[in-house]
Amino acid sequence: MADASLKRVLVTGGAGFLGSFLCERLVEQGHDVICVDNFFTSQKFNVAHLLDKANFELIRHDITHSLWIEVDEIYNMACPAAPGHYQYNPIKTMKTSILGATNMLGMAKRTGAKVLQASTSEVYGDPEIHPQPESYRGNVNPIGTRACYDEGKRAAETLFFDYHRKNKVNIRVVRIFNTYGPRMHPFDGRVVSNFIRQALQGEDLTIFGDGSQTRAFCYVDDLVEGIIRMMNGPDDFVGPVNLGNPGEFTIKELAELVIELTGARSKLIYRSLPADDPTQRKPIIDLAREKLGWEPKVPLREGLVQTIEYFRGINFADFRAPTPNY
Ligand code: NAD
Ligand code: UDP
C-alpha cells in the first residue's frame, strides 16, 4: 500500500538556489517532486543530479502563465531574488510575484493543495525598528528601484491572506532573510557570491557604501529545514514567520571574513551605495522557535567554508550571466 505520508509536491523556482535544495530534500524524503522553472536566474545544472530519480520531474514553465497540476503541496519559490536580477526587468518581477501567486493560489483553491509562499525580509524595506518582528509593517519606498520586488512580495502576501480568508486556502507564508550557500549563481551580484567569486578570481572585493550596513546571513541547510517545518506545521499557524539567522554582521566584516577564509590577497574597494539599500537587517525568530521548534545551527564562518568549497569546485566560465548587469 502507498505510504500516505508521501505527497505530490510542486516546487516553483525549483532549479534556483533555494529551490534546488528544497527539491533535493523532498526527493530524499520520498515525495513525488515536480520542479517548475523558466531558468531565468538558474540553470539545469542545479538539479541535474535529480533528473534520473524516479520521483523527480522537471518542467520548463513560466509561472506568470497558468498551469494545471494536481498536487498536495506547492512551495512557491519562483522569483528572481538578487537585486541585479529583479531590477533587470522590474515589470516582469512584479508579474512573477503577483500573477505567479495568483496562479498558484488558484490551483491550490481548486485542488485543495496547501501552498507556501517564499516571502522576504524585504517586506520590511529599510526598517526603522531593529531587529524586525513579524508585526512590523515595514518602510518600503513604493516607487524606488527595489519596489518591483518589495511591493510584489507584499502584494503576494496580501493575495495569500485573502485567498485564505475568503476561499479557505490552506496557506503558509515565510519571510526569508538573507540566505547563502552552495549553488548561488556566481554572477548574481549578491554580496556573499560576489565576495567569494571576487576573492577566488584574485579581484578586489567591492564594498557598496562604507560597509557599515548590516545583514544577518542564514546557511541554506538551516533555511530549508525551516521552510519544510513550516509547511508541515499546524494548520492554525499560517505565518507570516521570519526565517533567518539572527547573527548580524556588517558588510565590511563579511568581506574581511571571506578574505581570511579564502586566503586571498584581495583588497577592499569602495563603490557607491545602491538606492534604497537597507542600512540594517536582523530577524527576531522567537515565533519560529516557539511554533516550529526551529532555529539556525550553522555559524557564518562554517557556512562560508562550505560555500567557498563549492565555488572552488565550479568553473565560472560554465555559468551564463543571466543579465547584462554583471
Ligand atoms: P534564485 O534566483 O536562485 O531562484 C529563483 C528561481 O525562480 C530561479 O530558478 C528562476 O529561474 C526561477 N524563476 C524566476 N522567475 C520565474 C518565473 N516567472 N517562472 C518560473 N520560474 C521563475 O533565488 P533564490 O535565492 O533561490 O530565491 C528563491 C525564493 O526565495 C525567491 O522567491 C526569493 O524571493 C525568496 N527569497 C530568497 C532569499 C535569499 O536570501 N536567497 C531571501 C528572501 C527571499
Ligand atoms: N553589497 C556590497 N558589495 C557587493 C554586493 C552587495 O557591498 O558586491 C552590499 C549591498 O549594497 C547590501 C548588502 O551587501 O548592502 C547585501 O546585498 P545583497 O544584494 O546580497 O542583498 P540585499 O541587499 O537584498 O539584502
Image: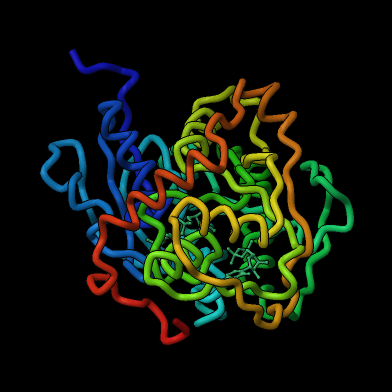
Q: Is residue 28 left or right of residue 142?
A: left
Residue furthest out toward the right: 128
Q: Position of residue 89 (x, y in %)?
A: 51, 82
Residue drawn at (71%, 56%) of the image: 250
Which image quadrant: the C terminus? bottom left
Q: Position of residue 128 (x, y in %)?
A: 88, 58
Q: Quadrant of ligand 2?
A: bottom right
Residue drawn at (72%, 71%) of the image: 277
Residue drawn at (51%, 42%) of the image: 219
Q: Position of residue 222 (x, y in %)?
A: 51, 35
Which image quadrant: the N terminus? top left
Name the foreground residue: 146 vs 113. 146
Q: Is residue 228 left or right of residue 119?
A: left
Colour pattern: rainbow
| Residue 148 visible at all | yes
Residue drawn at (32%, 67%) of the image: 39
| Residue 240 visible at all | no
Q: How many marks?
A: 0
Q: Is residue 249 above or below residue 42?
A: above
Name the foreground residue: 192 vs 253. 253
Quadrant of the image occupied by residue 271: bottom right
Quadrant of the image occupied by residue 142: bottom right
Q: Is residue 66 left or right of residue 234?
A: left
